[in-house]
Image (cartoon, rainbow, N blue to C red):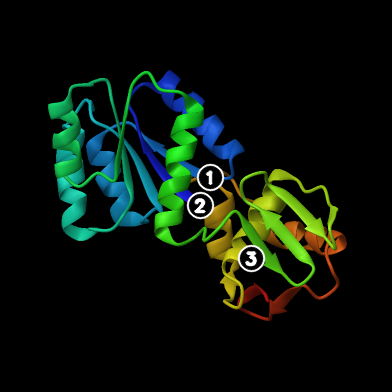
Amino acid sequence: MPVLLVEDDRDLAGGLKHALQNEGFAVNHVTTGGAALAAIEADVPDMIILDIGLPDMDGLTVLKRLRVVHPALPVLLLTARSSLDDKVAGLDSGADDYLSKPFDMGELLARLRVLQRRLGTVKSNDISIGTLSLDTATRAVCVDGDPIELSRREYMLLKALMENAGRVQTREALETKLYSWGEEVASNAIEVHIHNLRKKLVPGFIKTVRGVGYVVG
C-alpha cells in the first residue's frame, strides 16, 4: 500500500520509513509541504502521514489544500503540539486521526491499520480463497492449514492480489504496492516474484492475463 510520509525530521522519517516498509507499506518521503502537494498531484497515495511543523508551510495548510481535490484521502497528522485546541484544529481541517510526538511505533501502525479498514482494503484480518488463507495481522500464510514461508515482497504481492480477488492487477499497479517511490525496480521484478510465489502455492492459483497482468480467484 503506497503511503506518503511528509516529515522534515530526517532521523524520525528514516525510522518511520524503515518500520513502515517492514509492515508492507511502500513509502514516499518528502520534507516540505510544497513537495507533498506535488507528489500527491503526480501520484495519489493510499494514505498520508503528515507532520504539522513543516519548514515551508503549516501542515494544516497542506491538509486544507489537498482536501479540496481529495476529500476522502486518509490523513494521519503528526505533531509536537499536544493541546486540545491543536487536536481540534487538525481534525476540523480534515485529518482522519492525530498522533502527538513522541509516539510509540506500535500505536502508529495500529492507527494506520484502522485507516486501512476504513478504506475497505482490509475487511478482516483473514483473507481466504480456496485452500489458501492469509492473516494480515500476523502475516501468516497457510495452504490447507499448513504454513508456508514467504519473503516480505512475496507476502506483499500475494496480499495485493488476494485483496483484489477477481480483478486483474497490472504489473505497474503491483510495482506501486511493492516498491517505494524512487526505488530502483528491475524490469522483470514482478515476474520473478510471481514465479517464486507459484512454486509455493496451489498450481493455477495465480493466473496470467496475457498483456495485462495477474489475477487470483
Query: Sequence-wise, which precedes: disc 1 or disc 3?
Result: 1
Look at label 2 and name its amino acid. Answer: Met
What is the spatial separation of the Cα atoms under label 1 and label 2, in whole angstroms? 5 Å
Look at label 1 and name its amino acid. Answer: Phe
Q: Is residue 213 left or right of residue 110?
A: right
Query: Sequence-wise, which precedes: disc 1 or disc 2?
Result: 2
As drawn, 82 above or below 120: above
In front: mark 1 or mark 3? Answer: 3
Q: Is residue 162 left or right of residue 56?
A: right
**Which is more toward the observer, 210 or 152?**
152
Which residue is located at x 51 percent, y 52 percent?
A: 1
As drawn, 61 above or below 210: above
Which residue is located at x 16 percent, y 32 percent?
A: 58
Residue hosting label 3: 162
Mark 2 packing: few (<14 Cα in 10 Å), some, or many (20+)? Answer: many
Q: Position of residue 141 (x, y in %)?
A: 75, 53
The answer to whether residue 187 of the structure is visible from this angle is no
What is the spatial separation of the Cα atoms under label 1 and label 3, in whole angstroms? 16 Å
Circles 1 and 2: CB distance less than 8 Å? yes
Which element is circle 1 on? loop
Residue hosting label 2: 1
Residue hosting label 1: 25
Q: Is residue 178 left or right of residue 208?
A: left
